[in-house]
């Protein structure tokens, strides 16, 4: 799996650093081996108790309605706990932990329940750790600290995966919005209209320009009306993007008419010293269309 | 509104680290100036300036922040917006304010434009250390 496009998820290459950041040392990996004995002994009991606890809650029961499913989940939960203390803490371990977060998100299980279950698990394990070392404070403390670190590492991966899952949706929606908000259509033989809604930033201009140029070639249009009624403000970067687009259209031998320049936009453009001298501009799309039809010598009455 | 959320959190600043942060900067200032009572024309002037200055931060320094203070006294409202970055700095401020001068292959109309759009523009820049740009706009209200 590749998470390099995520701002939140730790990529495996960084995970070694992440372990250092969490002060997870070789010594901790050794301690976990000791903890594994406790885990293996008490695994069944802990998981049963955990599910008894979880199933008291209405909002958990929504996710765990089917007895078959509960049985299966208990099994994988046991696996999960056992792996936590017997892991190689390498790539496979890392992948699996991230997948847990992604799966939880997919099933719609909120982090609140995930963290809550963890808290209950810690509560059950603490007395068992003390028991195991015959209540030796120093040893218990050391083991518990290790236990705490691996849990934190685990939770960090799962929570980052949650965030990443949400982030992916947002990124996908952003792309869809960009594609949706630049419809380009032929409204007359030889004339295409491109209403721009929202801001024209770098990535969007690129897509807009591509779409417009393709549409012009496809429809063999000689005039493109770019309507900017829906653009809230134009700064120099937006103006530059517009001018670039117009120049590209001209290279195809077509003309551009900019329509929908509102009085406020006109004022700011003047203040910014932006010159649209060689470009035909009209206040409304209707006025722009009239000019286009005249240019094509199409009579309107 | 974003600005209400930020105000509730006690924030008076936004960090600029990506192109979408420029959009956020515009949105906050648009909401804030509208709430303060600036007219549509002034709001557009201020927001356009924010767009220019936030983009300058992003393009030249990659990382920086925008902070704001609003002022309201009887008959008068005002906004002060500060952009700060630890980027390469501006070698010659007078040159940067000349229309058409650009080190980023862009129009070079941004800073001189902001000067016209806003009431006050103050630039402090240390070569290689960073830049602070402060702009202000005032309006009379009833």
Image (cartoon, helix red, strand yellow):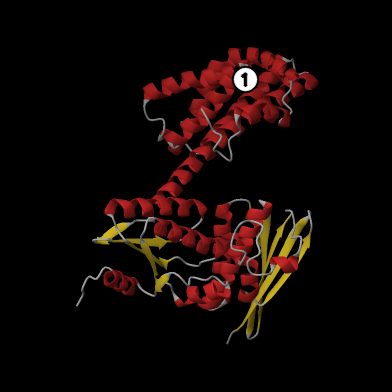
Q: Secondary structure at mark 1?
A: loop
Q: Which image quarter is the C terminus of chain B in?
A: bottom right
Tell me residue B26's x, y (percent): 56, 63
User: Image quarter for residue B65?
Assistant: bottom right
Relative to residue A21, is residue A114 drawn left or right? left
- Image: B81 above or below A109: below
Tell me residue A98's x, y (percent): 54, 29
Which of these two is toward me, A173 or B70?
Answer: A173
User: Image quarter for residue A257?
Assistant: bottom left
Relative to residue A253, is residue A3 drawn left or right? right
Q: How many marks?
A: 1
Tell me residue A160's x, y (percent): 57, 36
Residue A288 in sight from this viewpoint: yes
Relative to residue A175, is residue B142 drawn left or right? right
- Image: A284 above or below A154: below
Residue drawn at point x = 41 percent, y = 56 percent: A251
Residue B34 in sight from this viewpoint: no
User: Image quarter for residue A116?
Assistant: top right
Tell me residue A153's x, y (percent): 64, 29
Which of these two is toward me, A110 or A49?
Answer: A110
Relative to residue A292, is residue A201 drawn left or right? right
- Image: A217 above or below A27: below
| Disc 1 target residue | A90
Residue drawn at point x = 49 percent, y = 27 percent: A52
**Which chain is disc 1 placed on?**
A
Residue neighbourhood size for the residue with mark 1, other residues' Cα within 10 Å, grouped as few (<14), some (14–19), many (≥20): few
């Amino acid at each position: 799996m590749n998470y390099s496009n995520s701002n939140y998820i730790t990529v495996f290459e960084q995970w070694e650093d992440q372990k250092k950041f969490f002060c997870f040392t070789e010594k901790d990996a050794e301690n976990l081996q000791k903890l594994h004995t406790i885990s293996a002994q008490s695994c069944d009991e802990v998981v049963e108790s955990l599910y008894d606890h979880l199933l008291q809650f209405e909002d958990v029961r929504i996710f765990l309605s089917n007895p078959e499913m509960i049985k299966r989940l208990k099994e994988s939960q046991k696996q999960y706990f056992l792996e936590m203390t017997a892991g190689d803490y390498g790539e496979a371990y890392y992948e699996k932990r991230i997948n847990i977060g992604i799966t939880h998100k997919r099933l719609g299980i909120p982090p609140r329940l995930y963290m809550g279950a963890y808290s209950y698990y810690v509560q059950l394990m603490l007395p068992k750790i003390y028991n195991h070392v015959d209540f030796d404070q120093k040893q218990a403390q050391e083991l518990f600290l290790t236990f705490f670190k691996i849990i934190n590492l685990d939770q960090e991966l799962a929570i980052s995966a949650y965030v990443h899952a949400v982030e992916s949706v947002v990124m996908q929606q952003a792309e869809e919005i960009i594609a949706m908000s630049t419809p380009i259509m032929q409204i007359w033989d030889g004339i295409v209209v491109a209403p721009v809604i929202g801001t024209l930033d770098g990535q969007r201009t690129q897509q807009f320009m591509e779409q417009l140029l393709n549409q012009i070639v496809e429809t063999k249009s000689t005039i493109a009306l770019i309507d900017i009624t829906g653009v809230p403000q134009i700064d120099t970067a937006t103006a530059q993007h517009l001018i670039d687009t117009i120049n590209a259209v001209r290279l195809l031998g077509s003309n551009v008419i900019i329509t929908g320049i509102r009085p406020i936009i006109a004022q700011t453009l003047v203040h910014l010293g932006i010159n649209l001298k060689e470009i035909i501009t009209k206040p409304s799309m209707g006025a722009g269309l009239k000019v286009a039809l005249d240019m094509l010598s199409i009579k309107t009455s | 509104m974003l600005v209400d959320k930020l105000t509730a959190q006690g924030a008076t600043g936004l960090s600029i680290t990506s192109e979408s942060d420029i959009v956020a900067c515009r949105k906050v200032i648009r909401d804030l100036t509208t709430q303060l009572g600036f007219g549509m024309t002034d709001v557009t002037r201020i927001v356009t300036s924010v767009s220019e200055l936030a983009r300058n931060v992003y393009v030249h320094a990659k990382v920086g922040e925008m902070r704001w203070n609003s002022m309201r006294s009887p008959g008068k409202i005002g906004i002060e917006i500060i952009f700060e970055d630890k980027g390469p700095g501006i070698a010659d401020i007078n040159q940067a304010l000349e229309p058409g001068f650009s080190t980023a292959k862009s129009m070079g109309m941004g800073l001189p434009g902001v000067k016209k759009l806003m009431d006050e523009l103050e630039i402090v820049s240390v070569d290689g250390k960073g830049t602070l740009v402060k702009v202000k706009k005032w309006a009379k209200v009833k």
